[in-house]
Amino acid sequence: TFKAMRLLTHNFLKSNVKGTENGYPLNIEVKTIKCEDSPVDREFLLNMLPKVNYPALRKAVQQISPHCDPPLPEIPENVDVANTEGNQNLDATVIANLHKVMFDVYLVEGWLICPDTGRRFPVKDSIPNMILHEDEI
């Protein structure tokens, strides 16, 4: 099965509907979610952290957590993603929890919703459809 709509993927998506001033981060409306454990790659995670908008990641976790069974692990309230040297000292539990929410959670069916316009982008089979209608370009 192709698994594209991870929370990591969500962190990089935004609404580009014409006239949108605040199209990021997209809100998540869950219809179906899937969690699959994968091996933790500490080095890869630490290399990805500086590219992540951490407040947007936390918001996404909060939006999908009620739909996860078992519940998602706690992640720190704040992580200075730009502090690559300091992040080397994150403990194994924090690394494992960040890995879980960024790489092991998939939105299978649902919607990504523009916070500015309310435009709903469908997610089907874990693939987000961000194609705009002609009048939105």
Image (tube, rainbow, N blue to C red):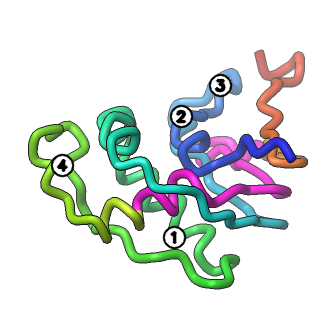
Specify few, some or many for label 3: CA neighbours under 10 Å numbering under 14, 14-19, or 20 or more: some
Of labels 3 and 1, earlier in sequence is 3
- Residue that badge 2 annotates: 12
Vertical relation: 47 (above or below) 100: above
Q: Quadrant of residue 67?
A: bottom right
Who's the residue at 39% across and 76% down the image?
74
Disc 3 vs disc 4: Cβ atoms closer than 8 Å? no
Who's the residue at 36% across and 69% down the image?
75
Label 3 SS: loop
Q: Position of residue 11 (x, y in %)?
A: 52, 42
- Mark carried by residue 62: 1
Disc 4 vs disc 2: Cβ atoms closer than 8 Å? no
Instruction: Please report the bounds of the magenta region as a residue range.
Output: 98-119
- Residue that badge 3 annotates: 16
Q: Quadrant of the C terminus?
A: top right
Label 2 SS: loop
Of labels 2 and 1, earlier in sequence is 2
CA gap between label 1 and label 4 equals 22 Å
Disc 2 vs disc 1: Cβ atoms closer than 8 Å? no
- Mark carried by residue 24: none
Q: Is residue 35 left or right of residue 96?
A: right
Q: Is residue 57 left or right of residue 6?
A: left
Residue type beneath disc 2: Phe
Of labels 4 and 2, earlier in sequence is 2
Residue type beneath disc 3: Asn
- Mark carried by residue 87: 4
CA gap between label 3 and label 4 equals 32 Å
CA gap between label 3 and label 2 equals 12 Å
Disc 3 vs disc 1: Cβ atoms closer than 8 Å? no
Q: Which of these two is toward me, 74 or 25?
A: 74
Of labels 1 and 4, earlier in sequence is 1
Q: Residue furthest front?
A: 39
